[in-house]
Image (cartoon, rainbow, N blue to C red):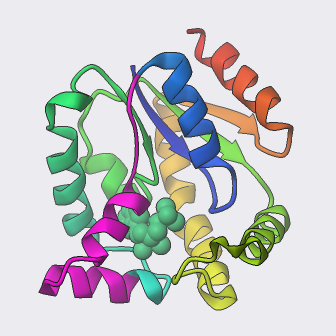
Amino acid sequence: MKLIIIGIQGAGKSTQGNLLKKKLKIPYLSTGHIFREIAKERSSLGRYIKETMNAGYLIPDDKTLEIVSEYLSRPEYQKGYILDGFPRTATQAESFKNGIDKVVYLEVSDKEALWRLSYRGEDGHEREDDTLRALRKRIELFHKFTGPVLEHYKKKRKLVTINGEQSIPKICKEIITKLKV
Ligand code: AMP
């Protein structure tokens, strides 16, 4: 099964992605993680990705599509996967032809997401690109660019919307039920 998990930063995508990975026995990958790995490289691409991420901007669509397509062509993803963080724009969604089965949208309010993220920072897991300004910018970009992505999958009848402000086990149960797996 090829799944996409969409949600604002702090919605719990990686928590649910990892739970689904165990339940469905398919790999979980996130574009945020892929880009953070590339950002560590001492190359011009690495520096460029790092600067773009730290400013809270999205990586351009052509670069993103190229990198994601390369990852998904690897043998471990041929039987299915849970993809987090992609597509983030209408262009990415329209250009991505990978036979996606369902798109899970974890719906969480901006207020709740910001609260969770500032709490995570205090917990000692602050990321370099997690300044409040960058967080607000990413939330703004999420609504601007990802809204049309949700519409795209809604029209294709692939969108499954889940209330992300419930307990972790309850959210997971609801996803499994709604996916009918
Ligand atoms: P995330 O961990 O999903 O919040 O991603 C961290 C950063 O990686 C984002 O703020 C973007 O700069 C970049 N990124 C991740 N996924 C994408 C994508 N699908 N398109 C463009 N940029 C992305």
Name the spot of residue 64 as percent of width and height, x first: 26, 63
Q: Residue at x 29, y 27 (%)?
A: 99
- x then y, percent, for residue 102: 48, 27
The span picked out in magenta is 26-52
Q: What residue is drawn where x is 74% and y is 21%?
A: 173
Q: Position of residue 51 (x, y in %)?
A: 35, 89
**Left or right, residue 5 beside residue 37:** right
- Judge whether residue 157 can be spotted in this image: no
- Ligand 1 location (quadrant): bottom left
Between 50 and 127, which is closer to the camera in this rendering? 127
Q: Position of residue 127 (x, y in %)?
A: 56, 77
Q: Which residue is nearer to you in this view: 38 or 94?
A: 38
Is 38 within the magenta?
Answer: yes
Q: Nearer the viewer, residue 43 or 159?
A: 43
Task: Note whether residue 150 is visible.
Answer: yes
Residue 79 location, quadrant? top left
Taking the spot 57% from the left edge, 57% from the top edge, the residue there is 147
What secondary structure predominates along the stretch shown in magenta?
helix
